[in-house]
Image: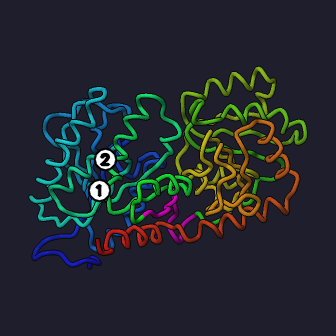
Amino acid sequence: MADEKSGAGERPAIVLLSNDLSHPALSKQQYAFSWRINRLRPLLKRGYTIVLVVAGGTVGPRGRPRLSSLKPKVRNDGPMVIVSPPVLRLPMLWLLQSMLVTPLTVFLYCRSKNLAVKAVVAASVPYGAVGKMLNRLLKTKLIVDYGDPDYAREKSFSLRVLHFLESYVLGKGGVDAVTCIDPNICGYVARYRVKNVAFLPPGGYWIGSPPPQITEPRAGTKEVIYAGHLAPPPAYRLDLLIEAAPLILAQHPEARIVFLGSGEYSPTLRRRAAELKIADKVEVLGPVPYEEAKRRIGGAYVAVQLLNDMCLGTKVLDYFALGKAVVSCGSFYDSYSQFLKNGENCILIPPEAEKLAEAISSLLSDEALRKRLGANALDAVSGYDWDSQAEKLLKLITRPK
């Protein structure tokens, strides 16, 4: 039974407006995207239908977006329904098309299947604009997830477009709730005076499966691991770890620096390691299955988050749930007091190579500190398993307007 009553014969549903799928099968999604789906999966047990709307287009060969056909695509992936509205992938025009075509497509689909939509959940502020148009037809609740701190990353024209969309979506009571993946983003959203702003980190775990089963570091080596997208600066700062590596290895010659994941920065990492004459101490592994990634992270001494701005992200939740000692860098490093707590469950530093080397070296030297941070990290993430996150989201959906 769903938590909220519906009309006769109607099935309660939640619509998730998302970005492109990286793979047609939900089970093979990139993890950075899958957390939004996993957050909703527990609601299936409560009788909800989840309608995942690929508002940005369909998936083509090798996972790349392509021009959508003019006929909407609908398919089932287990208990979830995936709807791909027709969208021409033209630069600067897809959002405008989505605001017109997607709401109509979803409205007609939900009506044809006799679905009572209890909420539209938008995966970003731009998709919130699509959701706002859809709500004019469905007259339901709109919940927007504010992900990466785009307000700190976008420049010039893109920043003006973002502010316009934010004002449209978040201003003047246009949204029922906003979920944020970072406490600092919650503070930013507060400027719009949204009534309900909730911190929901970008990740979790299924109770009863690893994590939270903890793996001890492998004997004989001290691995420092970064697991995630291998992207170049300015947003990602993998360059800091490769530049810090000689300083770390000078103190801990038995250490190894591991980059796990795929991305356009991989060749640069390998080339720079060769230039620094530490290629035998640096591994750039490429992508591995998620379960294998967890085992590799579990065997590391120190896990690292490398961003230019915020210190929280999907990988930090994975690190915490595996009980790892975490070093996270970002220009917002000194503004965290919720969830991330410097010196208590992680080490927060500015994006500087010397500071990074110092923090990692201290953890490689101090077993007691490393274990204390790891234990506190596991404790911090314990309230954010997928079922708990779904419960928090459900409270936003079912609370009176």
Asked if residue 198 lies in the magenta stretch, the reply is yes
State the residue at coordinates (76%, 36%).
353
Stretch of the chain drawn in magenta: 197-210
Q: Is residue 342 above or below residue 168?
A: below
CA–CA distance in space, label 1 to label 2: 7 Å
Q: Which secondary structure dominates the residues rendered in magenta? A: loop
Q: Is 121 positioned to the left or the right of 295 in the image?
A: left
Residue 228, quarter of picture: top right
In the depicted view, which residue is nearer to us: 142 or 289?
142
The percent coordinates of residue 115 (x first, y second) are 16, 64
Asked if residue 199 lies in the magenta stretch, the reply is yes
Assign the N terminus to one quadrant of the image. Answer: bottom left
Q: Which residue is mark 2?
A: 168
Binning the other alpha carbons within 10 Å of mark 1 as few (below 14), some (14 to 19) or many (20 upward) gives: some
Q: Which residue is mark 1?
A: 174
Residue 396, quarter of picture: bottom left
Q: Pointers 1 and 2 in contact (CB under 8 A)? A: yes
State the residue at coordinates (31%, 59%).
173
Q: Secondary structure at mark 2?
A: helix
The amino acid at mark 2 is Tyr
